[in-house]
Amino acid sequence: MELYLIRHGIAQAREIALPDEVRSLTDKGRDKTRQVAQRLYDLGVRFDIVLTSPLVRSQQTAKILHDCKLSRNNIAESAHLAPDGSIYNWLDWLKEQQYPQQTQLALVGHQPNLGHWAEILVWGEQRAKLVLKKAGIIGITLPETDSPIGQSQLYWLTPPKFLL
């Protein structure tokens, strides 16, 4: 399975009066995310499934991916991708889905979670070393095993500036 971890685009600044879950993409964030999505499309990247965090900025990023025809299906929300989500709970959920090995799955979420998830999948532990920039992508191949933890292969770590 190919897993693409995609961080949401540039969002509104944190403010006391603005709850984190409703912060949306800025105009610059939408534009940059569209440019990244278009470049991915040009490279032939497509997703069978796009799962997004329930937070607005991630949902907006996932919609841009879908609108740029990167997604073959509709977008689904996953609470596991919220900032307090657990990779272990998500892996249990993934196992239940029984997706075919050739599935290309995009997860749209947040940093540091996505960086930590990639580290756990590749190295078997969180090292707090992988940084995923806004609208950046990590590509990981999950092996055909019951537990991909520490057995997955990192094949892509790209900040948006290298796609634009």
Image: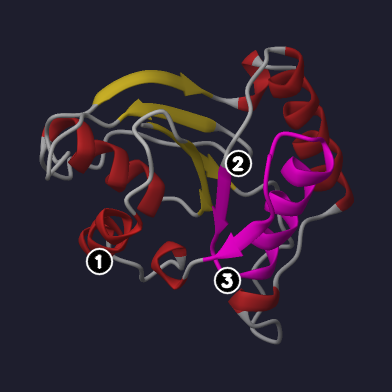
Depicted 119 relative to depicted 79: above or below: above
Q: Quadrant of residue 140?
A: top left
Say left or right for 137 vs 45. Answer: left
Q: The N terminus lies in which quarter of the figure?
A: top left
Say left or right for 3 vs 38. Answer: left
> Which is more toward the observer, 38 or 99?
99
Q: Nearer the viewer, mark 1 or mark 2?
A: 1
Q: Quadrant of residue 119?
A: top left
Q: Quadrant of residue 149?
A: top left
Tell me the crowding category of disc 1: few under 14, some 14 to 19, or many 20 or more residues within 10 angstroms, Cα based.
few
The residue where tag 2 is placed is: 134
**Residue placed at 63% from the left, 28% from the top?**
46
The residue where tag 1 is placed is: 89
Q: The C terminus lies in which quarter of the figure?
A: top right
Q: Which range is magenta?
A: 49-77
The amino acid type, in three-letter code, at marker 2 is Lys
